[in-house]
Amino acid sequence: MGNSVHRHLAVIALLSLAAQTAHATLQSVTSDGSCFPDQQNLTGAPLSASAHCGDATAAAQADIGIGGLGAMVSSGGTDSALAHAQFTTDLFFLPNQVVPLTVTMHFTGAITGDDAFGDLFQAAVTLGGLNFGVFGYDTPTGFVITQNGQSGVYPFNHAVVNAIGTSVARDKVDMTLTFSETLNIGASGYTDQIGGFIEASYNPADPGNSGSVDFLDPATVWFSVPPGTQFTSDGFLEGPPTPEPATLLLLGAGLAGLAAKRRTEGTRA
């Protein structure tokens, strides 16, 4: 019994050690270096940052509790802007497990106005300090989205990365990123850092070009592992987001209506 208690206390100690690691970084920057609020390594409450200099504006937000990230910039045609939001947390897996781990990100956004120079947005899930996602940019032949990250990248040689776009039009981006990897947890346990980031930027391709990159409607990031997996994390969303209350009400009403319809059909029979 004494050994069992010691093992239990050891597990509690490991869980405590792995906790308190979640942090978020927000940055809003415009071309005037005097105008960029910057918040880093903050934990707990939802975070936001914004900047306005010249004819450029930037805003970013992060809420690790719900797995939400957002970034938005705009320019009147003279100045450029950049907004970046990110959060990460350490997952500690107890020893001697085989763990299929999936990190998922769903995001939407809209890019309006004239052509820009360089990346317009980046979005990625992060695992082990590596980014797996997409970036979008303007080219002479139109708007392009390119996937960044694929299986075969050390140390994730057997990883599966999928980028599925419901819409990839410049004025309506709607995508889901999924990164999967199977972790073989050794006798000492294993800690891995997971999270996500989203970035918006607008740099006019020519003087007078104006536009906006709006991904401020929060992207959602979550992770999933099989039931029974022994792990701990601090403040990060496990499992897909739950429906909003209004969605649940509609779902309940629909199910109630279906049940009533079946009762009526049964009575007629």
Image (tube, rainbow, N blue to C red):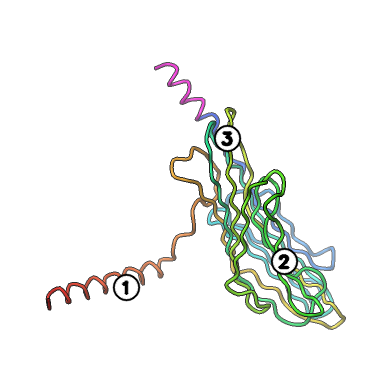
Residue indicated by mark 2: 146
Residue indicated by mark 3: 185
Q: Which amino acid type is marked by label 2?
A: Thr
Residue indicated by mark 1: 254
Residue occupying the far right of the picture: 207
The segment highlighted magenta reads: 1-11
User: What residue is at 57 percent from the left and 57 percent from the top?
Assistant: 104
| Left or right, 89 with reference to 120 | left
Label located before the other in sequence (2 or 1): 2
**x and y, in percent, of residue 159 in the image:** 63, 50
Q: Which amino acid type is marked by label 1?
A: Gly
| Left or right, 205 with reference to 263 | right
Q: Nearer the viewer, residue 215 or 230?
A: 230
Label located before the other in sequence (3 or 1): 3
| Left or right, 101 with reference to 269 | right
Q: Which quadrant of the rendered structure holds the N terminus?
A: top left
**x and y, in percent, of residue 178 in the image:** 59, 57
